[in-house]
Amino acid sequence: MSDVLRLTWTFLWLSFLCVGGGVGVIPEMQRQVVQNHQWVTAREFVDGYTLAQLTPGPNMLIAAFVGYRAHGVPGALLATLAMFLPTSLMAILVADRWRRWRDHPWAGAAERALAPVGMGLMAAGVYTLARSALHDALTIALALGAALVLATRWAPPMLVVLVAGLVGWLLGA
Amino acid sequence: MFTWTGILSIGGGRAAFFYEALVVRRRWLGTDEFLQDYTLAQLLPGPNVSNLAITLGHRLAGLPGAAWALLAVVVPGLVILLALAVLYFARGLAPTTTSLMHGMAAGVVGLLLVTSVRLMRPVLVNARAVVIAAGTFAAVGPLRLNTALVLLVAAALSLWLHRPAAGR
């Protein structure tokens, strides 16, 4: 199988593992794109996620970043299509029926059942990114500082991330 | 149909932006309808933001609405991110860029910590939910088990524990 096809196929099945938020798929995505296929390094992966976070739109656009590294612009477009198109088609198919199903007792049960699973996956995603991003005292301090500022809602998220970058640059993170 | 173009103005973003733009400002749908689609977007596999855009677009303008909403949410970000990726890989190894990226990545982790805690608070309301979430985290995070496998087992187990007859 050619590597472009492998890239497309990988993001396609990864997209179906996004349950309750994209961050949850990060551990598996990291394993596939860093360890298994070596399209990006662990450092590039976390930097790609950072850039996707700074960009408007879904963070799962990180697919485009990885795709670009592996196979240029065509790789980026294919990875993005694989990430968004199949699950979107499924959403359209289900949206109609959902209006009939949602009063069913199992619909409510599914909602309550999947939410904590999604939360566990999300926590694992944050853990995976933290392991690559926090490699010394300075980066740990920056992350905790950013969390503290954001928890008290002093400043908007993007400003906090940019300031963290500036501080990292000044102190040579 | 052309009013739907308005979605482009928000250029993608988070659920709160959609709520603000569609329910509060334009009054195209009610809070109740919005929450219905929000739940569905969470339940369905796939990136949440695009799922939400698709279901809202579909509700407002059918298939063309859904297609347009997907494009509006993905394309602007894709163009920007591609530009950043080109810059990053062209000059990524320069020491200045490296320390800037290290700082920003740490900031993003801080942001994710805060967002996750906020999202978890209303979900982890009983011991059952906490145990399921903690088990899923341990399996996928530190234990590095295959996510598809964990998801299958955890979802089945959780569905059983939350089955309608078992009550809330």
Image (spheres, grey):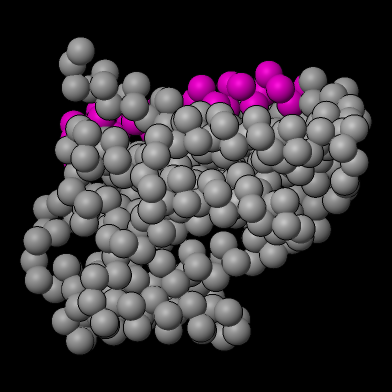
Q: Would residue A54 be seen by someone viewing this image from the given angle?
A: yes
Residue shown at 81% from the left, 33% from the top: B163
A129 sits to left or right of A75: right
B147 sits to left or right of B168: left
Residue sticking out furthest to the left = B94
Give how far across and how far down residue A155 sits, in percent.
53, 82
Q: Is residue B117 above or below residue B68?
A: below
B20 sits to left or right of A82: right
Q: Main secondary structure of the magenta part?
A: helix
**Span colored in magenta:** A68-96
Q: Quadrant of the N terminus of chain B?
A: top right
Count of numbered labels shown in the rendering: 0
Residue sticking out furthest to the top = A1
Residue shown at 61% from the left, 44% from the top: A117
The quarter of the picture where residue A93 lies is: top right
Magenta stretch containing residue A102, yes or no? Answer: no
Residue shown at 38% from the left, 48% from the top: B143
In the image shown, does A150 or A64 lie closer to the viewer? A150
Q: Is residue A171 above or below residue B15?
A: below
Give how far across and how far down residue B130 sits, in percent.
66, 56
Magenta stretch containing residue A80, yes or no? Answer: yes
Give how far across and how far down residue B84 sits, in percent.
27, 54
In the image shown, does B9 or A7 lie closer to the viewer? A7
The quarter of the picture where residue B147 lies is: top left
Give how far across and how far down residue B14 sits, in percent.
60, 54
Q: Would residue A57 be seen by someone viewing this image from the given angle?
A: no
